[in-house]
Amino acid sequence: MNHPPVATAQPTRIGLVAATAAGRRHARTLADAWPHARVVTADTVADALRAAWAGYDAVVAFLATGAVVRILAPLLGDKRTDPAVVVVDEAARHAIALLGGHAGGGNDLAGRVGALLDADPVVSTATDAAGLPGLDTLGWPVEGAVAAVSRAILDGEPVTLVADATWPLPALPDNVRPAEPPAPAGTAGASGPPASCGVSASDGPSAPGRASGSAGAPGGGGGYRLLVTDRVVPIDDRTAVLRPPSLVVGVGASRGVPADEVRDLLARVLAEAGLSPASVRHLASADIKADEAGIRAGADALGVPLVTYPAAELAAVDVPHPSEVVRAAVGTPSVAEAAALLGGGAELLVPKTVTAMATVAVARHAPRGRLAIVGLGPGAADLRTARAVTELRRAAVVVGLDQYVDQVRDLLRPGTRVLASGLGAEEERARAAVAEATAGHAVALVGSGDAGVYAMASPALEYADGRVDVVGVPGVTAALAAGALLGAPLGHDHAYVSLSDLHTAWEVIARRVAAAAEGDFVALLYNPRSRARDWQLGAALEVFAAHRPPQTPVGVVRNASRPGERVHLATLATLDAALVDMYSVVVVGSSQTRIVAGRMVTPRGYRWRP
């Protein structure tokens, strides 16, 4: 089956323009670090800047801001297509996002320039300065009075949120409030009036996407509105519309179908149904149509991928209008309707519509919640990954142990709902995070270190099903933080063992400790000792002592990268277990581990080679 391509970060072509020797040095620093960046030269600096504007996706200009403004002002077109521009001063003290802050990625580029040149990024975009998500940064098409509604959100004016369903939007501030549920009424079909949008109940003012009401109704007493809908709706100067990726269009066609026939049919079907082309997630068809130029042209016209399925998979879908003629030709009684419905949680809005050589059907797919499982690292802010920060700011709901949530509260957007609990509630946190994501929200489940290492990823993924998109965000583990503080104890094979018998019987733990000892692995002992479990560490060290010499190095790191950090070096013969608690990681060296200049070192082991 051909799935939609996975989104990956593509390197943006960046043109670098400088006028002075210092500027050229700074530009060379960026060019050396970024393979996709080029220094642009011409007869004059102004010509070089114009060439960079015309030939690159983004421009970094090592010039005075006023000069850049004067040169580029006549070239300005549309913020959605103009390149981003970042201006850096002569001393590289500031990286100013001058143009294309949101749409062009200028704000992000200013941050990356600042990181390389040790310059302060200067971002003046209002939503960024206020810690709010820009409506044009959510990854969905947005239409209507975007600037006016964004300003209303910033100014704290009431904005009514009206959504067809619960979508995984980021947190929105308290002045963005769900519409009141409409009075019960009959259900209208896809081609009914726009005012008949489906609704979902809201559980509170800070639950983005859980709005209810009619996307076509006035709502909010004539104030500002933010609609989330795939329907074509009336838009005034106080209404912005986010287009969620809810629609899948199934397409079947005879061999050699003209591209114009497919494009015209797609446009007509969507228009007659009152559905926005901007909400089409992808076109879908049978595998044997994957190379059909006319269908591919239809996908290109909408700017979406083409997804294809085997005939047997399509044949398993129950459709209202099967065809034995199609079955005989393709191996499935339906292509368009079946392909539109595949993927689960779909409702057929437009049954198959046929022209001479093409067939189209449209289905609306239920929103999928988003669960980001985020490792926060060992504790220090500078050991927290940029991706973790991005996911925390992308979330509308954050779930975690109270002390871990407290580490990142300053990163959360206004309106973020926080579900924090104390020690020993791992299962409850996992279930709560999955339940929120299954309901359609954007959720971040946080844990220390890496969330997949003795943390929240495994219990959460035991409960998450196919209705939830899962994003894993790796983090620096306690073991890695401890290893860096001790020296290089992990230079060769190593094993992780938790000594906590709360979830694993001690007999099982003992066998694993013995296997690590007999295999001569460097061993990292998690959850080594607590007030209630004060004998397991001693028992484990006795097992290691039976297989390794008494002078084998042992390192204990407590509160790695956090206040109260402590590093202690000992040996199997001298370690005092009383120094160890649940905030500690114990690293037991292998038979090859040595102390070199006060640091634990496990040789990589190349010396055996001739």
Image (cartoon, helix red, strand yellow):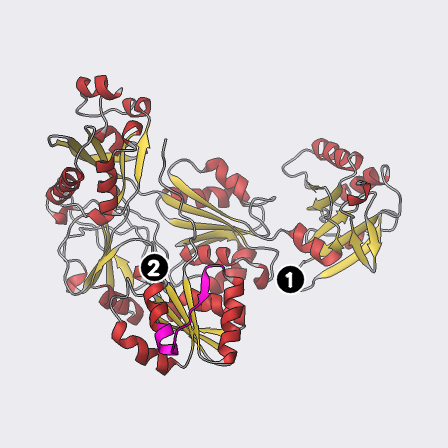
Query: Where does the image place residue 238, in percent across and percent down from the top left?
Result: 18, 64
Kindly identify the amino acid type of the residue bearing the numbered disc 1. Answer: Arg
**Residue drawn 79% across the image and 54% down it:** 600
Q: Helix, strand, or loop for circle 2?
A: helix
- Residue 224 falls in image quadrant: bottom left
Q: Nearer the viewer, residue 31 or 483?
A: 31
Q: Which of pointers 1 and 2 indicates the residue nearer the eye?
A: 2
Q: Is residue 45 found inside the magenta-colored segment of the image?
A: yes
- Residue 84 falls in image quadrant: bottom left
Q: Is residue 434 visible?
A: yes
**Residue drawn 58% across the image and 55% down it:** 377
Q: CA distance from mark 1 to mark 2?
A: 34 Å
Q: Nearer the viewer, residue 304 or 578?
A: 304
Span highlighted in magenta in the image:
35-49
Whether 293 is drawn above or below 446: the answer is above
Q: Residue furthest front?
A: 43
Q: Which residue is mark 2?
A: 137
Rendered image: mark on residue 562? 1
Question: Which quadrant is home to the N terminus?
Answer: top left
On the rendered structure, is 131 left or right of 460?
left
Q: Is residue 127 visible?
A: no
- Residue 359 falls in image quadrant: top left
Whether 105 is drawn above or below 476: the answer is below
Kindly identify the amino acid type of the residue bearing the numbered disc 2. Answer: Thr
The answer to whether the residues at label 1 and label 2 have Cβ atoms under 8 Å apart is no
On the rendered structure, is 245 left or right of 605?
left
Q: Is disc 2 surrounded by few (<14), some (14 to 19) or many (20+) residues within 10 Å? A: few
Question: Which quadrant is home to the C terminus?
Answer: top right
Query: Where does the image place residue 393, in percent across and percent down from the top left?
Result: 43, 59
**Residue drawn 14% across the image and 38% down it:** 261
